[in-house]
């Protein structure tokens, strides 16, 4: 699979949820010698057109209220970018924002929205992943997101160096 530069569109949780997840991500990164990153849910990934990103973000954020996602479970997978994550239920709000970004970016990528917030990016054994999954307690049933970010990154993200090369290129607040 070829690798390319893309723009990932993230929603960011509000405080104090954001600090809770950041602390958990930092703790896991330290314990497992893994990269640190900002807590986020990816809403869309599309072509890298950094000159148009500000317009895409402001168009998509305009009229979009804060997004509330229902947390389902902590889970894990063998995919580097989904080693350990909180899975959220798909809802109309997130689907509408995904569609707004697609329309504003005039982007026809095949990205499939699957709302989750990653907690750890690290290759590890199934056993270790399972043990870790059951050790994580998320005290929130719902998480509110109030900002949208565009992040320049390599796709697919496969390593710590890829994560550390991510760059936020634009940010917008969602309406109240």
Image: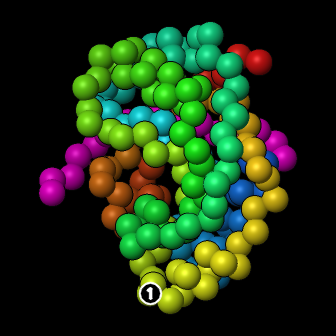
Q: Which residue is mark 1?
A: 125
Residue 173 against residue 41 in the figure, above or below? above
Asked whether 49 or 61 is in front, the reply is 61
Residue 115 located left or right of residue 18 = left
Q: Position of residue 43 (x, y in %)?
A: 48, 36
* Secondary structure state at the residue bearing disc 1: loop
Q: Residue at x 39, y 14 (%)?
A: 104
| Residue positioned 47% across, 74% down in the render | 122
Residue 156 percent across, percent down from the top left: 30, 54
Magenta stretch, main secondary structure class: strand
What residue lies at 34% left-to-right and 64% top-to-bottom? 158
What is the x, y in percent for residue 93? 59, 26
Q: Which of the 4 image quarters holds residue 13?
A: top right
Tell me which segment is drawn in magenta. 1-16
Residue 151 in magenta stretch = no
Can the viewer see residue 139? yes
State yes or no: residue 9 in magenta: yes
The image's colouring method is rainbow
Above or below, comparing residue 110 to residue 108 in the picture: below
| Residue 40 x/y as whole percent | 59, 46
> Is 114 placed left or right of 176 in the picture?
left
Quarter holding the C terminus is top right
Query: Dot 1: within a 10 Å radius of its alpha carbon, few (fewer than 14), some, or many (20 or more) residues?
Result: few
Question: Is 34 displayed left or right of 23 in the figure?
Answer: left
Quarter of the image with the N terminus is bottom left
Residue 122 in the image: above or below residue 158:
below
Instruction: Indicate whether 123 appears above or below 91.
Output: below
């Amino acid at each position: 699979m070829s690798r390319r530069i893309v723009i990932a569109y993230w929603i960011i949780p509000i405080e104090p949820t954001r600090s809770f997840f950041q602390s958990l991500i930092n703790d896991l990164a330290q314990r497992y010698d893994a990269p640190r990153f900002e807590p986020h849910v990816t809403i869309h990934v599309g072509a890298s057109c950094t000159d148009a990103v500000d317009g895409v973000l402001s168009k998509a954020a305009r009229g979009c209220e804060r997004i509330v996602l229902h947390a389902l479970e902590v889970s894990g997978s063998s995919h580097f970018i989904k080693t350990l994550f909180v899975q959220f239920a798909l809802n109309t709000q997130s689907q509408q924002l995904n569609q707004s970004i697609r329309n504003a970016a005039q982007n026809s990528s095949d990205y499939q929205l699957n709302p989750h917030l990653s907690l750890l990016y690290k290759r590890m054994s199934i056993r270790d992943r399972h043990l870790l999954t059951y050790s994580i307690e998320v005290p929130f049933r719902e998480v509110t997101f109030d900002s949208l970010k565009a992040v320049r990154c390599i796709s697919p993200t496969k390593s710590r160096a890829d994560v550390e090369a991510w760059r936020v290129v634009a940010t917008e607040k969602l309406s109240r």
